[in-house]
Amino acid sequence: MPVDKPPTLADVARLAGVSVPTASRALNPGVRGKNSGSPELRRRVVDAARALGYAVNPAAQTTKGGRARTIALIVSDIEDFGSATMISGVMHAAEKRGVSVAVRTTLDDPLRELELLTALRGERHRAVVIATARTTDMPRERALEAQLRTLDEHGTRVVIVGDSALDFPAVTVDNHEAGRLLADALARSGKRRFAILAAPPMEITSRDRVHGFLQGLSEHDITVPDADVIHQSFSRNGGYAAIDMLGDRIERLDVIAAMSDAMAVGAIARLRELGVESPRDLEVTGFDHVPMLGDVLPQFSTVEVPLEAFGEAALSLALDEDGPDPGARIALRATPIVHGEPIIR
């Protein structure tokens, strides 16, 4: 009994009344995503493919230069709330463009970061989006830049998420100004005695948030003793450990300002173990605006960083058909939220 041959792209094109290249572009839209061809044309081609039972083979698809229809996204910690939201944004943006995402995590280990970048050379991704914490450690940053430069020279586009001195296209947010506005609003609400939970001083994002927050307090003649600026890992566990480092000084505080929502969660958990409820006894604030925190703590103060929007912005730089300038920047806006209400500038 003869076996029917599987439908081909030529069969789809014939049924849709278009050329084979046109059918290919409609089914494999590449970086233009849903903007490739008119909606009516795409509908005809997709309907024809569905009627014939034709399916694109993703493994067979490559981009110009033999590159895979994938991008690599590198984050520090896949379990971090902020990273998870950013991953979601990148994946949504990639899906619209018919591109897959390979996520890699460095576990905040600089050596692992370099090893991952070396391994990525052989995977031939269209682009690499690096969303790990950038630092003031110049040897580390120079080693990273060398790896990224090699990828770039081999045809893989590089996009940085966050502030960095590295000369690659980047998506940024003004952490300093957002921190200043958050502190200003808290001071205006009557808060006077603060402690700050931050990442190690070399991490640029945390540093900028702290400096902005301190500036906002200084505008109200409020100072924070150096001993009350606690540096720990930028994570839930870091926030948890930081509370014990504050010790008995907790009793005289109005606010513990964590420079990430993840740190805020750890701080709140440890305070509860100590019999201190937030915000009833002591206010804990965050930075990033993880939606679930707003659900369980409607009066929670934080800064809404458009983490999901980073995905669309980063991919627009990574997959722009003409290629961005090396110094291209997309600046997104962060919005302070104080006691559940956004501060509109």
Image: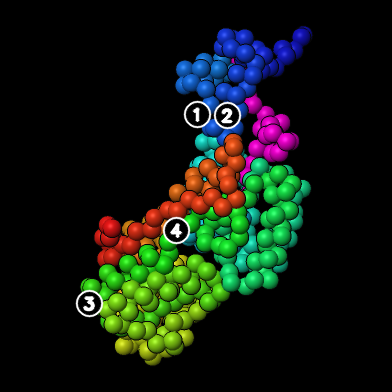
User: Which residue was labeled with disc 2?
Assistant: 29
Q: Earlier in the sequence, mark 4 or mark 3?
A: 4
Residue 58 is covered by the magenta coloring: yes
Residue at image location 63% in from the left, 22% down from the top = 24
Give the number of the disc on residue 173: 4
Colouring method of the image: rainbow
Describe the element under mark 3 as helix, strand or loop: loop
* Label 4 to label 3: alpha-carbon separation: 28 Å
Residue 276, located in which quarter of the rendered image?
bottom left
For residue 30, which quarter of the picture?
Answer: top right
Q: Earlier in the sequence, mark 1 or mark 2?
A: 2
- Mark-to-mark CA distance, 4 and 2: 30 Å
Report the amino acid beneath label 1: Asn
Q: Which residue is mark 1?
A: 35
Q: Which residue is mark 3?
A: 190
Looking at the image, residue 64 sits to the left or right of residue 23; the answer is: right
Q: CA gap, disc 1 to disc 2?
A: 8 Å
Q: Give the Cα distance between marks 2 and 3.
A: 55 Å
Residue type, label 4: Val
Tell me the SS state at disc 1. helix
